[in-house]
Image (tube, grey):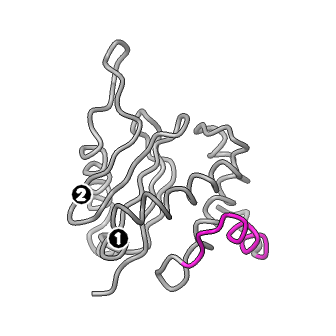
Amino acid sequence: MAAAAPNIELTTSTITSTLCRYWGGGAASWSTEGSQARAQWERSLWAAAAPWPTAAGQPKSPDSGMGVVDEFAMVWRQIGELVVFVAGDDEYDELILESEVFPLVEALLREHCGGKLVESTLLHYDTYGKVVLTFEEMLRQGHLLYTNVETVLRMSKLKKLDTKL
């Protein structure tokens, strides 16, 4: 089985899924299993990153971590109001996700959100489309091709933003 490109999920610290982009791995079976399989995957990510505070007065959760979920390496980090999960298999182990993929994802988010990493900024129609487009530009045929922020941004500017997102 060929390695799948890393999967990226952005959520808020209140466990509200904001943006998910899956290129492979467990996502391949979701077309037949439906949204329940995807929801189970997302619950597994949150469970692996627990504990998360749900009410005022609870102890502060850690801001980052790594683990294994369903045989996929997973790295997560809280950046501002957003929690970013990056998962991969085979050649996309914890080291690659942490040292190559995560810094790229974080830099692209900061570039498009103007450094204000909150849900409302990300969900702005123009910002959301640009983020999705740049995540698509990082990959070619299911493999991470670009790891330089300037290159990804330059390549994404060559494509027309679909305003129907």
- Provide residue 23's location: percent of width, then percent of height: 44, 73
The reply to whether the magenta stretch includes residue 146 is: yes
In this view, the residue farthest toward the top is 57
Q: Residue 29: x percent and y percent?
A: 29, 75
Q: Is residue 3 magenta?
A: no
The quarter in which the C terminus is drawn is bottom right
Residue, disc 1: 27
Q: Is residue 87 left or right of residue 159?
A: left
Tags 1 and 2 in contact by the CB under 8 Å rule?
no
Q: Quadrant of the N terminus?
A: bottom left
Span colored in magenta: 145-158
Is 3 in front, or is 18? 3
Three-letter code, disc 1? Ala
Residue 148 picture location, percent across and down? 64, 68
Circle 2: residue type: Val
Q: Which mark is residue 68?
A: 2
* SS type, badge 1: helix
Callout 2: few (<14), some (14-19), or many (20+) C-alpha neighbours within 10 Å? some
Q: In this image, 131 relative to 31: left or right?
A: right
Q: Main secondary structure of the magenta part?
A: helix
- Give me the C-alpha separation between circle 1 and circle 2: 16 Å
Residue at 71% in and 68% down? 162
Instruction: State the SS at label 2.
Output: strand
Residue drawn at x 55%, y 76% as measured from the top left? 139
Q: 10 Å neighbourhood of mark 1: few (<14), some, or many (≥20)?
A: some
Q: Residue at x 21, y 62 (%)?
A: 70
Q: In this picture, is 140 found above or below 164?
A: below
Image height check: is 74 above or below 3? above
* Res 3 → quadrant: bottom left
Looking at the image, which residue sits at the far left? Answer: 70
Q: Earlier in the sequence, mark 1 or mark 2?
A: 1
Q: Nearer the viewer, residue 60 or 18?
A: 60
